[in-house]
Image (cartoon, rainbow, N blue to C red):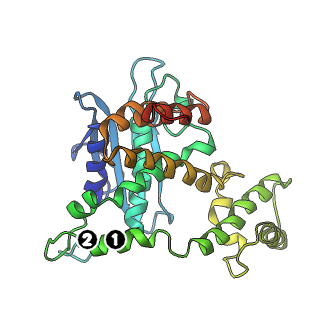
């Protein structure tokens, strides 16, 4: 699935990802790759820290050791993804779920946002964009995991090597819409609770206060009363990254669905013209140099010149 994520980037943007075992890393499990543009130009280094260990917190995320910028010459980024997959036994492959594979693609979409960045100032480099926009590149990238071109080539049987059957691919894609009403009803309170907590004043809050805000969010959003308690919702407790901004995942779903549809309309979901002239230019390389609505309007106009945005 790691190679599948790299191959998707090659098909879309023409970039190559090459192992760099000579690059120092912070743990024996971490792997390093060099990313190059179609013309061979160095774009940055990518690090994958994929396996769980006691010293890591749970979850999956992308971050950088160095941002791209041009203030004092060309500086290329050092980008990493962190996962918490379980290692296979000695001599056995590492097997992950389809949702884990989706997470891998999601985080590599964030990584590409940083690796393909081409701006002057580090503050607006890569994922340094408005909250309304930051999940678009990552959630959009998830769509390519579900394509038959990727699944048949990389989601092969771990014993026989046979490609995934068409019937199973159809089931996986159909499952994307299963139980979505329930999922949405449980996500709205999470979004509301971040906003409610962000608006509250004071450096500390009691357990009773946390529960009261969770109940208020549930009433406001009509959420699932059996959902996990507010204190179990970690993004609310992780500082500025999610302060009043957890809604961005749902808003970005509107954008990523429309953006992937633009590729589908070409008849080729890997259409290089759309990827290079529109997606790369106005989304993946542009950082925060444009307002989100301007960036998306420019993308839509670039890939659909005959349609009104």
Q: Residue at x 41, y 17 (%)?
A: 73
Q: Nearer the viewer, residue 11 or 119?
A: 11
Please say if 61 is above or below 52.
above
Residue 166, which numbered label?
Answer: 2
Q: Are marks 1 and 2 in contact (CB under 8 Å)?
A: yes
Q: Position of residue 267 (x, y in %)?
A: 32, 47
Q: Which residue is mark 1?
A: 170
Q: Position of residue 254 (x, y in %)?
A: 57, 52
Separation (CA) of disc 1 from disc 2: 6 Å
Quadrant of the drawing holding the C terminus: top right
Q: Position of residue 255 (x, y in %)?
A: 54, 47
Q: Residue at x 59, y 55 (%)?
A: 249
Q: Residue at x 72, y 52 (%)?
A: 244
Q: Residue at x 46, y 42 (%)?
A: 64
Please say if 160 is above or below 139.
below
Residue 192, which numbered label?
Answer: none
| Residue 236 in the figure: left or right of residue 46 | right
| Secondary structure of residue under mark 1 | helix
Q: Quadrant of residue 277?
A: top left
| Secondary structure of residue under mark 2 | helix
Q: Nearer the viewer, residue 129 or 92?
A: 129
Q: Can I make out residue 52 in this image?
A: no
| Residue 155 in the figure: left or right of residue 176 | left
């Amino acid at each position: 699935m790691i190679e599948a994520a790299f191959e998707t980037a090659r098909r879309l943007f023409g970039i190559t990802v090459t192992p760099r075992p000579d690059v120092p890393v912070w743990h024996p499990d971490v792997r390093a790759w060099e990313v190059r543009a179609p013309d061979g130009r160095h774009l940055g280094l990518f690090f994958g820290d994929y396996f769980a260990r006691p010293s890591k917190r749970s979850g999956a995320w992308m971050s950088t050791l160095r941002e791209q910028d041009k203030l004092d010459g060309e500086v290329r980024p050092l980008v990493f993804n962190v996962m918490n997959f379980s290692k296979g036994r000695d001599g056995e492959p590492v097997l992950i779920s389809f949702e884990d594979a989706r997470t891998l693609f999601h985080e590599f979409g964030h990584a590409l946002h940083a690796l393909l960045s081409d701006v002057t100032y580090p503050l607006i480099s890569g994922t340094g964009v408005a909250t309304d926009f930051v999940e678009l590149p990552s959630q959009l990238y998830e769509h390519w995991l579900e394509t038959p071109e990727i699944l048949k080539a990389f989601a092969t049987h771990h014993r026989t090597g046979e490609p995934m059957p068409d019937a199973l691919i159809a089931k996986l894609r159909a499952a994307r819409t299963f139980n979505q009403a329930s999922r949405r009803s449980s996500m709205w309170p999470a979004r509301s609770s971040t906003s409610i907590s962000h608006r509250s004043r004071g450096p500390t809050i009691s357990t009773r206060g946390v529960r009261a805000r969770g109940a208020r969010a549930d009433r406001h959003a009509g959420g699932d009363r059996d959902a996990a308690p507010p204190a179990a919702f970690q993004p609310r407790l992780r500082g500025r990254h999610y302060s009043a901004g957890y809604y961005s995942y749902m808003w970005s779903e509107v954008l990523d669905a429309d953006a992937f549809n633009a590729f589908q309309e070409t008849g080729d979901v890997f259409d290089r013209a759309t990827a290079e002239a529109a997606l790369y230019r106005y989304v993946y390389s542009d950082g925060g140099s444009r307002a989100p609505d301007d960036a998306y309007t420019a993308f839509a106009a670039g890939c659909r010149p005959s349609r009104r945005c």
